[in-house]
Image (cartoon, rainbow, N blue to C red):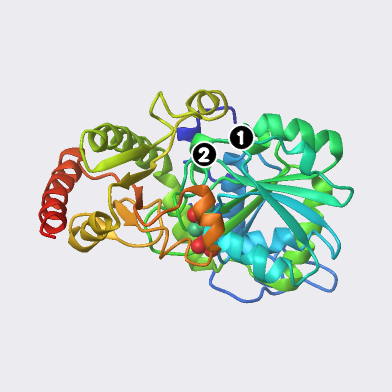
Protein backbone atom coordinates (compact mmCIF):
# COMPACT_ATOMS: atom_id res chain seq x y z
CA UNK A 1 0.00 0.00 0.00
CA UNK A 2 1.35 3.42 -0.92
CA UNK A 3 0.77 5.53 2.18
CA UNK A 4 2.67 7.78 4.58
CA UNK A 5 5.27 6.24 6.87
CA UNK A 6 3.06 7.14 9.86
CA UNK A 7 0.34 4.91 8.45
CA UNK A 8 2.86 2.25 7.43
CA UNK A 9 3.73 1.86 11.14
CA UNK A 10 0.16 0.59 11.66
CA UNK A 11 0.08 -1.79 8.70
CA UNK A 12 0.42 -5.38 9.83
CA UNK A 13 0.41 -8.24 7.39
CA UNK A 14 -3.33 -8.99 7.42
CA UNK A 15 -2.83 -12.36 5.78
CA UNK A 16 -1.35 -13.49 9.10
CA UNK A 17 -4.31 -12.39 11.23
CA UNK A 18 -5.70 -15.25 13.32
CA UNK A 19 -9.23 -16.62 13.06
CA UNK A 20 -10.30 -14.54 16.09
CA UNK A 21 -9.23 -11.22 14.59
CA UNK A 22 -6.80 -10.30 17.37
CA UNK A 23 -5.57 -6.75 16.67
CA UNK A 24 -2.52 -7.21 18.88
CA UNK A 25 -0.62 -9.90 17.01
CA UNK A 26 -0.30 -13.08 19.15
CA UNK A 27 2.95 -14.19 20.74
CA UNK A 28 3.61 -17.65 19.31
CA UNK A 29 5.60 -18.93 22.24
CA UNK A 30 6.55 -22.25 20.73
CA UNK A 31 9.83 -23.89 19.81
CA UNK A 32 8.42 -26.18 17.17
CA UNK A 33 5.42 -26.66 14.87
CA UNK A 34 3.44 -29.77 13.93
CA UNK A 35 3.72 -30.99 10.36
CA UNK A 36 0.52 -31.43 8.43
CA UNK A 37 1.90 -34.58 6.83
CA UNK A 38 5.08 -36.05 5.39
CA UNK A 39 6.89 -33.43 3.33
CA UNK A 40 4.32 -30.79 4.24
CA UNK A 41 4.83 -27.62 6.28
CA UNK A 42 2.67 -24.74 7.46
CA UNK A 43 5.66 -22.54 6.60
CA UNK A 44 6.79 -22.84 10.21
CA UNK A 45 8.91 -25.78 11.35
CA UNK A 46 11.19 -24.66 14.15
CA UNK A 47 11.49 -21.23 15.80
CA UNK A 48 15.23 -20.86 15.18
CA UNK A 49 14.28 -20.69 11.49
CA UNK A 50 10.82 -19.11 11.47
CA UNK A 51 8.21 -17.97 13.96
CA UNK A 52 4.94 -16.18 13.15
CA UNK A 53 5.39 -13.36 15.69
CA UNK A 54 8.89 -12.73 14.44
CA UNK A 55 7.68 -12.97 10.84
CA UNK A 56 5.06 -10.30 11.48
CA UNK A 57 7.77 -8.04 12.91
CA UNK A 58 10.13 -8.79 10.03
CA UNK A 59 7.45 -7.97 7.54
CA UNK A 60 6.79 -4.51 9.00
CA UNK A 61 10.49 -3.65 9.35
CA UNK A 62 11.10 -4.74 5.76
CA UNK A 63 8.12 -2.65 4.67
CA UNK A 64 9.34 0.45 6.56
CA UNK A 65 12.82 0.15 5.02
CA UNK A 66 11.48 -0.59 1.52
CA UNK A 67 13.35 -3.89 1.58
CA UNK A 68 12.66 -7.28 0.11
CA UNK A 69 13.21 -8.97 3.47
CA UNK A 70 14.09 -8.06 7.04
CA UNK A 71 15.61 -10.58 9.43
CA UNK A 72 15.12 -10.12 13.18
CA UNK A 73 18.01 -10.90 15.51
CA UNK A 74 18.48 -11.23 19.26
CA UNK A 75 20.49 -7.97 19.25
CA UNK A 76 21.92 -5.35 16.96
CA UNK A 77 25.36 -6.89 17.44
CA UNK A 78 24.07 -10.34 16.42
CA UNK A 79 22.72 -8.72 13.24
CA UNK A 80 26.05 -7.04 12.46
CA UNK A 81 28.04 -10.21 13.29
CA UNK A 82 25.88 -12.17 10.86
CA UNK A 83 26.42 -9.64 8.08
CA UNK A 84 30.18 -9.94 8.62
CA UNK A 85 29.86 -13.71 7.99
CA UNK A 86 29.27 -12.80 4.33
CA UNK A 87 33.00 -12.02 4.08
CA UNK A 88 35.75 -14.61 3.99
CA UNK A 89 39.38 -14.75 5.15
CA UNK A 90 41.54 -12.41 3.10
CA UNK A 91 38.73 -9.95 2.43
CA UNK A 92 39.10 -6.28 3.25
CA UNK A 93 36.45 -3.73 4.17
CA UNK A 94 36.31 0.01 4.76
CA UNK A 95 34.58 1.51 7.79
CA UNK A 96 33.82 4.97 9.00
CA UNK A 97 36.18 5.68 11.89
CA UNK A 98 33.41 7.08 14.10
CA UNK A 99 31.08 4.15 14.80
CA UNK A 100 29.19 2.51 17.62
CA UNK A 101 31.89 1.19 19.99
CA UNK A 102 30.52 -2.36 19.94
CA UNK A 103 30.90 -2.52 16.16
CA UNK A 104 34.53 -1.41 16.39
CA UNK A 105 35.10 -4.09 19.05
CA UNK A 106 33.54 -6.70 16.75
CA UNK A 107 35.78 -5.66 13.83
CA UNK A 108 38.91 -5.63 16.01
CA UNK A 109 38.35 -8.74 18.08
CA UNK A 110 36.27 -11.03 15.87
CA UNK A 111 36.61 -9.98 12.23
CA UNK A 112 40.41 -9.74 12.44
CA UNK A 113 40.60 -13.20 14.02
CA UNK A 114 38.48 -14.43 11.09
CA UNK A 115 41.11 -13.20 8.64
CA UNK A 116 39.54 -9.90 7.61
CA UNK A 117 41.31 -6.57 7.46
CA UNK A 118 39.83 -3.09 7.39
CA UNK A 119 40.68 0.54 6.85
CA UNK A 120 38.96 3.23 8.94
CA UNK A 121 38.42 6.67 7.42
CA UNK A 122 36.25 9.71 7.95
CA UNK A 123 33.65 9.17 5.24
CA UNK A 124 31.98 12.51 5.81
CA UNK A 125 35.20 14.19 4.66
CA UNK A 126 37.35 11.71 2.74
CA UNK A 127 36.83 10.06 -0.63
CA UNK A 128 36.67 6.27 -0.21
CA UNK A 129 38.16 5.52 -3.65
CA UNK A 130 41.87 5.70 -2.73
CA UNK A 131 41.24 3.13 0.02
CA UNK A 132 39.60 0.52 -2.18
CA UNK A 133 41.88 -2.48 -2.67
CA UNK A 134 41.65 -5.48 -4.94
CA UNK A 135 40.17 -7.50 -2.05
CA UNK A 136 37.79 -4.83 -0.72
CA UNK A 137 34.37 -6.43 -0.40
CA UNK A 138 32.35 -4.07 1.78
CA UNK A 139 31.92 -0.51 3.02
CA UNK A 140 30.36 -0.08 6.44
CA UNK A 141 29.04 3.22 7.77
CA UNK A 142 26.65 5.02 10.10
CA UNK A 143 25.16 8.40 9.36
CA UNK A 144 24.92 10.45 11.48
CA UNK A 145 27.86 8.84 13.27
CA UNK A 146 28.11 7.91 16.92
CA UNK A 147 28.86 10.06 18.83
CA UNK A 148 30.26 12.83 16.62
CA UNK A 149 27.16 13.17 14.40
CA UNK A 150 29.15 13.36 11.15
CA UNK A 151 26.92 13.06 8.10
CA UNK A 152 27.89 10.97 5.08
CA UNK A 153 26.26 11.25 1.68
CA UNK A 154 24.95 7.70 1.24
CA UNK A 155 24.14 8.05 -2.45
CA UNK A 156 27.63 9.32 -3.25
CA UNK A 157 29.22 6.29 -1.57
CA UNK A 158 26.67 3.94 -3.17
CA UNK A 159 27.56 5.16 -6.65
CA UNK A 160 31.16 4.12 -6.01
CA UNK A 161 30.40 0.77 -4.33
CA UNK A 162 27.98 -0.17 -7.09
CA UNK A 163 30.53 0.59 -9.79
CA UNK A 164 33.18 -1.49 -7.99
CA UNK A 165 30.85 -4.36 -7.02
CA UNK A 166 31.34 -3.77 -3.30
CA UNK A 167 28.61 -4.23 -0.67
CA UNK A 168 27.42 -1.07 1.05
CA UNK A 169 26.25 -1.70 4.61
CA UNK A 170 24.57 1.12 6.55
CA UNK A 171 23.75 1.03 10.26
CA UNK A 172 20.53 3.08 10.34
CA UNK A 173 19.94 2.85 14.10
CA UNK A 174 20.29 6.57 14.87
CA UNK A 175 17.52 7.69 12.52
CA UNK A 176 15.37 4.55 12.20
CA UNK A 177 13.38 3.91 9.01
CA UNK A 178 11.05 6.71 10.07
CA UNK A 179 13.63 9.32 9.05
CA UNK A 180 15.93 7.54 6.60
CA UNK A 181 15.84 4.63 4.14
CA UNK A 182 19.40 3.76 3.03
CA UNK A 183 18.26 1.03 0.59
CA UNK A 184 16.49 3.72 -1.44
CA UNK A 185 19.77 5.64 -1.56
CA UNK A 186 21.70 2.68 -2.96
CA UNK A 187 22.79 0.73 0.12
CA UNK A 188 22.74 -3.08 -0.20
CA UNK A 189 22.28 -3.94 3.47
CA UNK A 190 20.72 -1.96 6.32
CA UNK A 191 21.35 -2.98 9.91
CA UNK A 192 19.55 -1.78 13.01
CA UNK A 193 19.77 -2.09 16.71
CA UNK A 194 16.05 -2.66 17.28
CA UNK A 195 16.78 -2.01 20.94
CA UNK A 196 16.76 1.71 20.21
CA UNK A 197 14.10 3.73 18.37
CA UNK A 198 12.26 0.76 16.86
CA UNK A 199 11.65 -0.85 20.27
CA UNK A 200 11.50 2.59 21.78
CA UNK A 201 10.98 1.78 25.46
CA UNK A 202 14.29 0.40 26.77
CA UNK A 203 12.53 -2.87 27.55
CA UNK A 204 14.15 -5.30 25.13
CA UNK A 205 17.20 -6.02 22.96
CA UNK A 206 16.86 -6.79 19.25
CA UNK A 207 18.43 -6.22 15.86
CA UNK A 208 17.65 -6.29 12.14
CA UNK A 209 19.24 -6.86 8.78
CA UNK A 210 17.26 -5.58 5.80
CA UNK A 211 18.13 -6.30 2.16
CA UNK A 212 16.62 -5.76 -1.26
CA UNK A 213 18.42 -8.50 -3.19
CA UNK A 214 17.09 -12.06 -3.30
CA UNK A 215 20.44 -13.81 -3.50
CA UNK A 216 21.92 -11.82 -0.64
CA UNK A 217 18.81 -12.55 1.39
CA UNK A 218 19.19 -16.28 0.83
CA UNK A 219 22.83 -16.20 1.95
CA UNK A 220 21.92 -14.25 5.09
CA UNK A 221 18.93 -16.48 5.89
CA UNK A 222 21.25 -19.50 5.59
CA UNK A 223 23.78 -18.02 8.06
CA UNK A 224 20.88 -17.01 10.31
CA UNK A 225 19.36 -20.46 10.58
CA UNK A 226 22.79 -22.01 10.98
CA UNK A 227 24.15 -19.74 13.71
CA UNK A 228 20.81 -19.22 15.47
CA UNK A 229 20.64 -15.68 16.81
CA UNK A 230 16.93 -15.19 16.05
CA UNK A 231 14.78 -12.85 18.12
CA UNK A 232 12.45 -14.57 20.62
CA UNK A 233 8.67 -14.43 20.10
CA UNK A 234 8.06 -12.23 23.15
CA UNK A 235 10.80 -9.75 22.23
CA UNK A 236 9.46 -9.71 18.67
CA UNK A 237 6.09 -8.74 20.07
CA UNK A 238 7.57 -5.92 22.17
CA UNK A 239 9.29 -4.37 19.16
CA UNK A 240 6.15 -4.89 17.07
CA UNK A 241 4.30 -2.86 19.69
CA UNK A 242 7.04 -0.24 19.85
CA UNK A 243 6.81 0.37 16.10
CA UNK A 244 3.13 1.33 16.39
CA UNK A 245 4.20 4.64 18.02
CA UNK A 246 7.47 5.14 16.12
CA UNK A 247 6.17 8.15 14.18
CA UNK A 248 4.78 10.12 17.12
CA UNK A 249 7.71 9.32 19.38
CA UNK A 250 10.28 10.41 16.82
CA UNK A 251 8.48 13.59 15.85
CA UNK A 252 8.24 14.69 19.46
CA UNK A 253 11.78 13.65 20.36
CA UNK A 254 13.16 15.48 17.34
CA UNK A 255 11.24 18.62 18.20
CA UNK A 256 12.68 18.47 21.73
CA UNK A 257 16.19 17.82 20.41
CA UNK A 258 16.23 20.95 18.26
CA UNK A 259 14.94 23.14 21.11
CA UNK A 260 17.47 21.63 23.46
CA UNK A 261 20.29 22.20 20.95
CA UNK A 262 19.48 25.93 20.84
CA UNK A 263 19.16 26.06 24.61
CA UNK A 264 22.50 24.33 25.23
CA UNK A 265 24.24 26.84 22.99
CA UNK A 266 23.29 29.61 25.38
CA UNK A 267 25.28 28.17 28.29
CA UNK A 268 28.79 29.58 28.66
CA UNK A 269 30.21 26.23 29.81
CA UNK A 270 28.98 24.49 26.66
CA UNK A 271 31.75 24.80 24.10
CA UNK A 272 30.10 22.89 21.27
CA UNK A 273 26.67 21.54 20.34
CA UNK A 274 26.59 18.94 17.56
CA UNK A 275 23.14 18.32 16.15
CA UNK A 276 22.55 17.92 12.40
CA UNK A 277 19.23 19.76 12.71
CA UNK A 278 21.13 22.99 13.38
CA UNK A 279 21.45 24.84 10.05
CA UNK A 280 25.18 25.44 10.59
CA UNK A 281 25.97 21.74 11.10
CA UNK A 282 28.22 20.74 8.16
CA UNK A 283 25.94 17.81 7.28
CA UNK A 284 22.68 19.74 7.49
CA UNK A 285 22.12 20.10 3.74
CA UNK A 286 23.03 16.48 2.96
CA UNK A 287 20.58 15.32 5.60
CA UNK A 288 17.85 17.47 4.13
CA UNK A 289 18.47 15.64 0.87
CA UNK A 290 18.73 12.07 2.11
CA UNK A 291 16.57 11.94 5.25
CA UNK A 292 13.13 13.11 6.34
CA UNK A 293 14.42 14.50 9.62
CA UNK A 294 17.44 14.95 11.86
CA UNK A 295 16.66 12.56 14.68
CA UNK A 296 16.87 12.94 18.43
CA UNK A 297 20.56 12.29 19.08
CA UNK A 298 22.63 15.25 20.15
CA UNK A 299 26.22 15.53 21.34
CA UNK A 300 27.68 18.42 23.27
CA UNK A 301 30.98 19.36 24.79
CA UNK A 302 31.58 21.27 27.99
CA UNK A 303 34.64 23.23 29.13
CA UNK A 304 36.11 20.70 31.54
CA UNK A 305 35.96 17.00 32.41
CA UNK A 306 34.96 17.99 35.97
CA UNK A 307 32.00 19.93 34.62
CA UNK A 308 30.91 16.87 32.60
CA UNK A 309 31.30 14.60 35.63
CA UNK A 310 29.23 16.92 37.77
CA UNK A 311 26.40 16.88 35.21
CA UNK A 312 26.44 13.07 35.15
CA UNK A 313 26.42 12.86 38.95
CA UNK A 314 23.52 15.23 39.41
CA UNK A 315 20.93 14.45 36.75
CA UNK A 316 17.57 13.25 38.08
CA UNK A 317 14.84 13.73 35.50
CA UNK A 318 17.34 12.65 32.86
CA UNK A 319 18.93 9.24 33.34
CA UNK A 320 22.67 8.69 33.23
CA UNK A 321 22.62 5.48 31.18
CA UNK A 322 24.01 3.80 28.12
CA UNK A 323 21.63 3.34 25.15
CA UNK A 324 19.27 5.57 23.20
CA UNK A 325 15.98 5.73 21.41
CA UNK A 326 13.55 5.41 24.30
CA UNK A 327 10.83 7.74 25.50
CA UNK A 328 12.94 9.13 28.35
CA UNK A 329 16.00 11.33 27.91
CA UNK A 330 19.31 9.56 28.55
CA UNK A 331 22.71 11.12 28.95
CA UNK A 332 25.76 9.01 28.05
CA UNK A 333 29.46 9.51 28.60
CA UNK A 334 30.91 7.93 25.44
CA UNK A 335 34.50 7.83 26.67
CA UNK A 336 33.74 5.40 29.55
CA UNK A 337 30.54 3.82 28.24
CA UNK A 338 29.70 3.19 24.57
CA UNK A 339 33.26 3.81 23.37
CA UNK A 340 35.26 2.31 26.26
CA UNK A 341 36.77 -0.36 23.99
CA UNK A 342 37.76 2.01 21.20
CA UNK A 343 41.55 2.55 21.01
CA UNK A 344 42.68 5.85 22.54
CA UNK A 345 44.24 7.20 19.34
CA UNK A 346 40.99 6.64 17.45
CA UNK A 347 39.02 8.48 20.14
CA UNK A 348 41.44 11.39 20.03
CA UNK A 349 41.37 11.60 16.26
CA UNK A 350 37.57 11.67 16.28
CA UNK A 351 37.33 14.23 19.06
CA UNK A 352 35.75 11.87 21.60
CA UNK A 353 37.11 13.56 24.72
CA UNK A 354 36.35 13.44 28.45
CA UNK A 355 34.37 16.66 27.97
CA UNK A 356 31.94 15.12 25.51
CA UNK A 357 28.39 14.07 26.45
CA UNK A 358 25.76 12.39 24.30
CA UNK A 359 22.03 12.82 24.70
CA UNK A 360 19.22 10.67 23.46
CA UNK A 361 16.42 13.18 23.74
CA UNK A 362 13.11 11.76 24.91
CA UNK A 363 9.50 12.85 24.69
CA UNK A 364 9.16 14.67 28.03
CA UNK A 365 7.94 18.24 28.16
CA UNK A 366 10.83 20.32 26.78
CA UNK A 367 10.41 22.94 29.54
CA UNK A 368 11.13 20.23 32.12
CA UNK A 369 14.25 19.01 30.32
CA UNK A 370 15.54 22.59 30.11
CA UNK A 371 14.69 23.16 33.77
CA UNK A 372 16.70 20.03 34.62
CA UNK A 373 19.68 21.37 32.68
CA UNK A 374 19.42 24.75 34.36
CA UNK A 375 19.56 22.97 37.71
CA UNK A 376 22.51 20.67 36.91
CA UNK A 377 24.45 23.43 35.18
CA UNK A 378 24.10 25.59 38.29
CA UNK A 379 25.37 22.75 40.49
CA UNK A 380 28.24 21.97 38.11
CA UNK A 381 29.24 25.61 38.05
CA UNK A 382 29.36 25.71 41.84
CA UNK A 383 31.26 22.43 42.11
CA UNK A 384 33.88 23.32 39.52
CA UNK A 385 34.52 26.89 40.64
CA UNK A 386 35.41 25.83 44.21
CA UNK A 387 38.95 24.77 43.31
C1 LIG B 1 23.16 -0.04 20.18
C2 LIG B 1 23.74 0.03 18.84
C3 LIG B 1 24.21 -1.14 18.20
C4 LIG B 1 24.21 -2.49 18.88
O1 LIG B 1 22.92 -2.94 19.13
P1 LIG B 1 22.52 -3.91 20.37
O2 LIG B 1 21.05 -4.07 20.18
O3 LIG B 1 22.91 -3.19 21.62
O4 LIG B 1 23.28 -5.16 20.19
C5 LIG B 1 24.71 -1.02 16.91
N1 LIG B 1 24.76 0.18 16.29
C6 LIG B 1 24.33 1.31 16.87
C7 LIG B 1 24.41 2.59 16.13
C8 LIG B 1 23.81 1.27 18.17
O5 LIG B 1 23.40 2.39 18.74
- State the residue at coordinates (71%, 58%): 83
For image coordinates 45% across by 52% down, the residue present is 352
In terms of image quadrants, where is residue 180? top right
Q: Nearer the viewer, residue 89 or 77?
A: 89
Q: Which residue is mark 2?
A: 150
Q: Residues within 10 Å of mark 2 (few under 14, many from 20)?
A: many
Dot 1 corresponds to which residue? 125
Q: Is residue 20 visible?
A: no
Q: Nearer the viewer, residue 184 or 38?
A: 184
Q: Is residue 140 visible?
A: yes
Q: Residue at x 81, y 35 (%)?
A: 162
Q: Is residue 58 left or right of residue 163?
A: left
Is the CB of the residue bearing disc 1 within 8 angstroms of ligand 1? no
Q: Does 264 sit above or below residue 359?
A: above
Report the mark closest to the observer, 2 or 1: 1
The mark nearer the N terminus, 2 or 1, is 1
**Quadrant housing residue 203:** bottom left
Task: Give the CA distance from mark 2 to mark 1.
Answer: 9 Å
The residue lying furthest to the front in this view is 387
Q: Is residue 109 above or below residue 83?
A: below
| Quadrant in which the C terminus is drawn | bottom left
Q: Position of residue 145 (x, y in %)?
A: 52, 45
Amino acid sequence: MNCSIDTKCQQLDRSMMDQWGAISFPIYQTATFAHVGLGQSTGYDYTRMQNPTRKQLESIVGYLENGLDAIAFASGMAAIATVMELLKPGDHFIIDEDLYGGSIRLFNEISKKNGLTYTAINMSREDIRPYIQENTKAVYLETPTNPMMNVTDIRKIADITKEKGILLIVDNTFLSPYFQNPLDLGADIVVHSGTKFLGGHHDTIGGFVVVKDQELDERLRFIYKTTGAGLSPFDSWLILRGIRTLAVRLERAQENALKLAYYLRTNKHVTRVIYPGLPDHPGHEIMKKQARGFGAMLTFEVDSAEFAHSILNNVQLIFFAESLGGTETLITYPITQTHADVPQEVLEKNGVTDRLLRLSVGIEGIADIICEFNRVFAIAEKETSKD
